[in-house]
Amino acid sequence: MKLSSVRLVPQLDLSPRWVAFAQTLPGKLCLVSSFTGLLFLHDVFLWWLISLYLLIFSLWPRHRWKILFAATWSFLMVLPTTFEWERINTLFSEAGIQWQIDTTVEGLPLILSAIFSIALLVRLARKSVLTRHLKRPVLVLICLYLGLMMIASYAPLLPAVRAFLWAFLVIFGQFFWFTCYSLKECRTPNPASITQQFGQYIPFWAPSVIPFPKGSGNLMRIEAKTSEDFAICQIKGLKLLLWALWLKLFAVAINITLYGHGEFLLGRLQFKRELGMVQMFFDGNYLRNLFTLPFSGLLPRYEIAFNLAANGSPLPWHFNWFILVADFLYFLLYFAFTTHIIIAIIRMCGFKALRNTYRPLASRTIAEFWNRFFYYFKELLVEFFFYPVFFRYFKKRPLLRMYTATMAAAFFGNFLLHFMRDIWYVVELGFFQAMIAFHTYFVYSFVLGNVIFLSQWRQEKVNRQTIGTVSRFFAPVRVLGFYCLLTIFVDFRRESISDNMNFLLSLLPF
C-alpha cells in the first residue's frame, strides 16, 4: 500500500455505494452509532441525548425543524447555560427579592419574558407600515439595548426594578444576535416562521451567543432537500467529527510533550511525563510506562509567564517567545476541533454548514486569517456592521468607504459584541466604568481593524503583481506572527494595559 493512499479520514461521501447505504435504515443506524461513539470519545456532555435526537433527525428528516425546536428547548432546560443564575440570585437577594433560581427550569419565567419581547419585536418589524419608517431595526435594537444598560446603571430606580431590569438584559443578551438575524430576515420574501427561528436560538449543538451557523434563513438555504443530499451531508458530518478526534489526540500529545500532562475520556485516562518518561493512568491508578522523550523540561503556561512579566520579573525573552507561540498554536488547535464538533452535529441534522475554522495556518493575509479562523463570528460582524456602512456611506470615495466599513466591523462591532457579552462587568461597575475597564480590548480591536484594512488594501495592490516564491512561503509566518503578538492584548481582565505592555516588552532581547 502506498503511503499517499493512506487517509486519516476515509472519503466515504465520494463513494456511491456508501451514499446509497446511508439512505437505508441500517445505514442510518450505522451512521448514528458511529457518530455516537465519536461523541463519547470527544467527552461531549450529554452525548447520549444528542445521539438520541440525531437518530430522530435521521429517521424523520422531513420534520427536522420541529425536532430542532424540541431538541433546542429541552437542552436549554438541562444544559449549563451562560445565564449565571447564581449572580442573578445575588442581584435579587441584594434587592430584597425572595426568588431563588437554581436551575433553568426555575428561571423559565425570565427566559419567556425575553422570548416574548423578541417575538413582539419580530412581529412589529414584519409590519409593512413600521418597516417603511424603521429601516434599520438592528441599529435601533442595539441602541435600545445599550440605552437600557445605561438606565439600569444610573437611573434612580427602585432596587427591585433595577434587579429585574438587569436580569432581563442578561437573559435577552444571550439571544441578542439571534434576534438581529431574525430582524434582518423580516425583509426577505418568505422568512422562517417564528417557531423555526426560536428553534435555532441558542441551538442544542452550540449554546453560544454567536449563532452557528447564521440565522434561520441561512439554515433554510443550506438544508438538505433530497435523501441523497441528506446522506452525503451526514457522512460529511461523520468525517468532520473523525478529523476532530485526530486533532484532539494531537492536542493531547502536545500537552504531554510541552506541559507534562494530558487527559482523555473525561479525565479518566491520564498521561503524565516525569523526567522524560510518559506514564499512563486510569482513574488515578498507574497502568504502564509508554515511552521516553529525549528531554525532561516542562514549559510554563502562558498565564504564568504573563504574570511574571506583569510583576516585573519576566522569564528570558527567547523563553517567552516560545511560550507565547506554543500557547497560540495550541489554542488554534483546540478551537478548531471544538468547533468541528459543532459543525459535525449540524451536518448530522441535515444542514450543509460550512466549517467555522478551515486551515488558518494557510492564511496569506491578515484579513484571510480572520475569515479562516472564526468564520461565523466574521460573518456576524460583516452582516450587521460592514455591509450597512459599506452600502450607505462614502460611495464616491472607495478607499474611505472600505476603511470605514472595515473599522465598523473589526473594531466597533468586535468591541461591542464582547462588551455586551460580558455584561456582568457593566452590572458590577456601571456602564461607563465598564467601558474604561475594557480599554485593553479597545486597543486590541482598534489595532485589528486598522491592520485588516491595510491587509485588504495591500492585497489589492499585490493581486496586480507577480508574487515571488519566498513571499508566498513567508506570508503565513508574518500573518501568524501578527496575531500571536496581538493576542497579548485580548486579556482585558486587568486594571491597566501596562501588564500587557510589560509582557510585550519582555519579548525584546534587551
Image: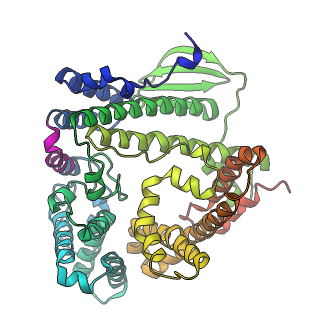
Residue 180 shown left or right of residue 284 in the figure: left
- Residue for point 57% across, 13% down: 2
How far from the left and from the top, in percent, is residue 432?
Answer: 47, 81
Placement of 74 over or under 460, stated as above or below:
above
Give whichever of 243, 163 is nearer the camera.
243
How far from the left and from the top, in percent, is residue 35?
Answer: 31, 29
Placement of 158 over or under 214, stated as above or below:
below
- Residue for point 26% across, 57% down: 216
* Range drawn in magenta: 60-72
Q: Is 71 contained in the magenta span?
A: yes
Residue 448 shown left or right of residue 8 in the figure: right
- The extreme right residue here reads 510
* Residue 307 visible here: no
Give whichever of 506, 345 is nearer the camera.
345
- The extreme bottom residue here reads 156
Q: Is 24 contained in the magenta span?
A: no
- Residue for point 64% across, 59% down: 486
Q: Quadrant of the N terminus?
A: top right
Residue 8 shown left or right of residue 316 in the figure: left
How far from the left and from the top, in percent, is residue 220?
Answer: 25, 53
